[in-house]
Amino acid sequence: MPTLSDKGISMPESPIRKLVPYAEEANKQGKTVYYLNIGQPDIKTPTMALDAVKIHSLDILAYSRSEGSEDYRKKIAYYYAKNDIHVTHNDIIVTTGGSEALLFAFGSIMDADDEIIIPEPFYANYNGFSIASDVKVVPVISKIENNFALPPIEEFEKLITKKTKAILICNPGNPTGYLYSKDEINKLAAIVKKHDIFLIADEVYREFVYDDITHYSILQVPGLEDHAVVIDSVSKRYSMCGARIGYLVSKNKKFIQTALKFAQARLSPPTLAQIASEAALETPDSYFEEVRSEYVKRRNLLIEELEKIDGVKVAKPNGAFYCIAELPIKNADDFARWLLEKFDHNNNTVMVAPAAGFYSTPGVGLNQIRIAYVLNEESLRVAVSVIAEALKVYKD
């Protein structure tokens, strides 16, 4: 039999999606499954985005420019300007989701065996993207005991070697909801300038910041133009996960020119999805105010209910719509599968994401789960009650 690549064999399964067959089987058995595993909001997509696709006047569904249509990129630049981020359309490449933006960034910045420093736990696909790019992840560990706050910024500098090409952060964070302060961003900026490396910020949850805190982008840091690369996406902002439209944003012209070659190699981002995403930029601020208010209510309810369960620790997020909970068990993979295969409470069960897949350090996060609070309050209350009842009878 032909052999497969080491890269393919090493590619990790998604902790978010790998339990899908078990959830499907639970559904076939007549159980109601509450999906807390994936960041698929139940918030409605803005009507103008859907209508733009319905009423388009295209005669031919043609390629767009590799970097995305010029009109769309100009409107994206205007969106950023409203958020006190000043870039031009030439600083933007439209990608097939934030995932492709990350792959283009990795490909443009790093060669095989180069290193990237990432605070963990981090978005699980960073592991996959790193393996696909033959890049080594060097983790900076944060802990649930202090709400996943970053260790002293100096800890990053200790990890920098000759092979270090970038530091990658997610702000606000997936899976923790951690929000970087302006001071932390400025300290990271000073480190990357000192060592002449890149600072990549995944800012796809920019709109979802709570408790009267303001999001601070790396593109707002003076003097960081040559070092700053932002990953962005319409998926969560407008509840358009299926559009698969993202952005790569940087004022570093050489970086953008290099990333464009990767964009040309895959031809162009999807045309209809760009039409929908361009229309979504007309979404009124009131939409985000309502969505933020809804997520704050969901977050507060989730944290309150989880804290009632004996032995459960939970970190309170300041952004995004995820939290990490530590359970009084040994292995969350086994628990998550058991929930779907063998447990129900009033014919209800829950799908969660085991958190070990959000770490690169072996053996860390084994008793943690990530919960996406993308369901309405009533559903969240039921889902947490299922977890509470399950923990009463579960045997490791």
Image (spheres, rainbow, N blue to C red):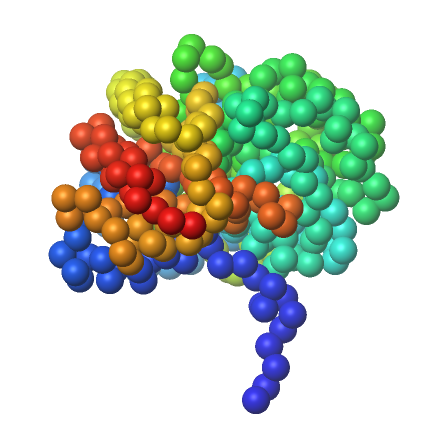
Q: Where residue 358 sits in the image (x, y, percent)? A: 53, 44
- Residue nearest the observer in this picture, 291 or 275: 291
Vertical placement of residue 247 versus 223, above or below: below
Q: Is residue 306 left or right of residue 66?
A: left
Q: Which residue is drawn at 55% across and 34% down?
A: 170
Q: Which residue is drawn at 41% across and 46% down?
A: 353
Q: Can residue 224 be seen in this view?
A: yes
Vertical placement of residue 37 versus 205, above or below: below
Q: Where residue 101 sits in the image (x, y, percent)? A: 54, 46
- Residue nearest the observer in this picture, 196 or 30: 30
Q: Where residue 245 sits in the image (x, y, percent)? A: 42, 45
Q: Is residue 102 left or right of residue 190?
A: left
- Residue nearest the observer in this picture, 307 or 70: 307
Q: Which residue is drawn at 60% across and 37% down?
A: 120
Vertical placement of residue 267 versus 322, above or below: below
Look at the image and tell me in which quarter the N terminus lies: bottom right
Q: Is residue 201 visible?
A: no
Residue 20, quarter of picture? bottom left
Extreme residue toward the bottom, this view: 1
Q: In this view, does 205 lie to the left or right of 44?
A: right
Residue 28, quarter of picture? bottom left
Q: Which residue is drawn at 38% across and 37% down?
A: 371
Extreme residue toward the right, this view: 162
Q: Where residue 233 sits in the image (x, y, percent)? A: 44, 39
The mark total stands at 0
